[in-house]
Amino acid sequence: MEDKTLVCQVCGKDFVFTAGEQEFYKEKGLQSEPKRCKECRDKKKASRNNHRYNNHDN
């Protein structure tokens, strides 16, 4: 496998889907390539975690 350059669907920036990441996806049985760059994935994850945390305060 070779590194692939993909385009983030959120911010539009190019990001590299490394051969190692591709192997990890394959091992986990994931069929689709990532749609978001690491920065956008991290932002989405943080948003999800904040939402869960805030719901426990109610």
Image: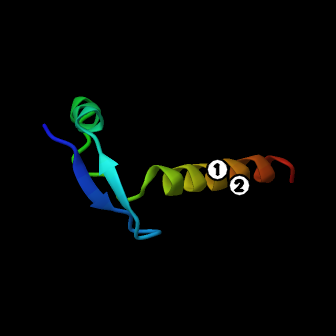
Residue 3 is situated, as x and y percent measured from the top left of the image, at 21, 43
Please, is residue 33 above or below residue 24 in the view?
Answer: below
In the image, is 1 to the left or to the right of 56? left
Which residue type does callout 2 highlight?
His
Which residue is denoted by mark 1 in the rendering? 46
The N terminus appears in which quarter of the rendering?
top left
Side of 48 where 20 appears, left or right: left
Q: Residues within 10 Å of mark 1 (few under 14, many from 20)?
A: few
The answer for how far apart the CA atoms under marks 1 and 2 are is 8 Å
Choose between 32 and 22: the one closer to the eye.
Answer: 22
Of the two numbered discs 1 and 2 on the same chain, state the one appearing first in sequence: 1
At numbered mark 1, what does the secondary structure look like: helix, strand or loop? helix
Q: Quadrant of residue 5?
A: bottom left
Mark 2 residue element: helix
- Residue in view at x 43 percent, y 55 percent: 37
Q: Residue at x 66, y 47 (%)?
A: 49
The residue carrying mark 2 is 51
Its colouring scheme is rainbow
Q: Residue at x 47, y 69 (%)?
A: 11
- Is residue 29 visible in the rendered structure shown here? yes
Q: Quadrant of residue 10?
A: bottom left
Using the image, tell me which numbered label, if any, was put on residue 1: none
Rendering coords of residue 15 (x, y %) = 36, 55
Whether residue 4 sits left or right of residue 54 in the image: it is left
Q: Nearer the viewer, residue 45 or 38?
A: 38
Binning the other alpha carbons within 10 Å of mark 2 as few (below 14), some (14 to 19) or many (20 upward) gives: few
The kind of residue tagged 1 is Ala
